[in-house]
Amino acid sequence: MAEEVRVDKWLWAVRVFKTRTLAAEECKKGHVMMDGVNLKPSRCIKTGDVVQVRKAPITLSLKVLQPIENRVGAKLVPEMMENITPEDQYELLELTKISGFVDRAKGTGRPTKKERRDLDTFLFDIPEEE
């Protein structure tokens, strides 16, 4: 087991990204940080480091428990990293899922019948306060 490992290899090995190429691209885009500093793919990380990964719309915080280079099975991932992402990030994710149909991307066409009903319910069914 290595004491230090490249951040792109580690992110791929603990299944944060599907391929190492994707992990390296996300590093280059500035979506992978440690202590508020963007990491290059070749940056080495060690046990105890906390890596922040921006996966829209949330930022995951992952603590390195074991720096590994080889991909492991999904059942072994909790031994390699600890997810210390704050709860407010997951609440933001839920809010985004709920309100996803409110701000449709331009060019995606008209809403479906179900989306239209959900939109009407969201916008016009305001509970009355007594």
Image (cartoon, grey):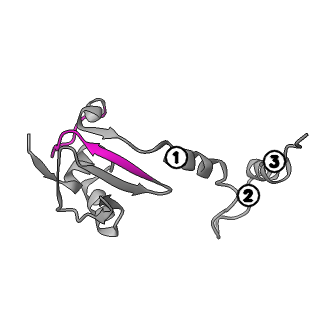
- Between 4 and 75, the residue placed more toward the observer is 4
| Residues at marks 2 and 1 touching, judged by CB atoms closer than 8 Å | no
Q: Nearer the viewer, residue 19 or 68?
A: 68
Few, some or many residues within 10 Å of mark 1 (<14, 14–19, 20+): few
Q: Which residues are magenta?
A: 59-74
The furthest residue to the top:
75
**SS type, badge 3:** helix
Which label sits in the foreground, 2 or 1?
Answer: 1
At label 1, the amino acid type is Asp
Q: Amino acid at mark 3?
A: Thr
The quadrant of the picture occupied by the C terminus is: top right
Residue found 32% across the figure and 46% down from its top: 62
Numbered mark located on residue 111 in the image: 2
Report, in whole angstroms, how far the alpha carbon at label 3 lies from the one at label 1: 25 Å
Report helix, strand or loop for mark 2.
loop
Say whether disc 2 or disc 1 marks the residue closer to the N-terminus.
Answer: 1
The residue that mark 1 highlights is 88
The residue drawn where x is 29% and y is 33% is 78
Q: Secondary structure at mark 1?
A: helix
Question: Which residue position holds label 3?
Answer: 121
* First in sequence: mark 3 vs mark 1: 1
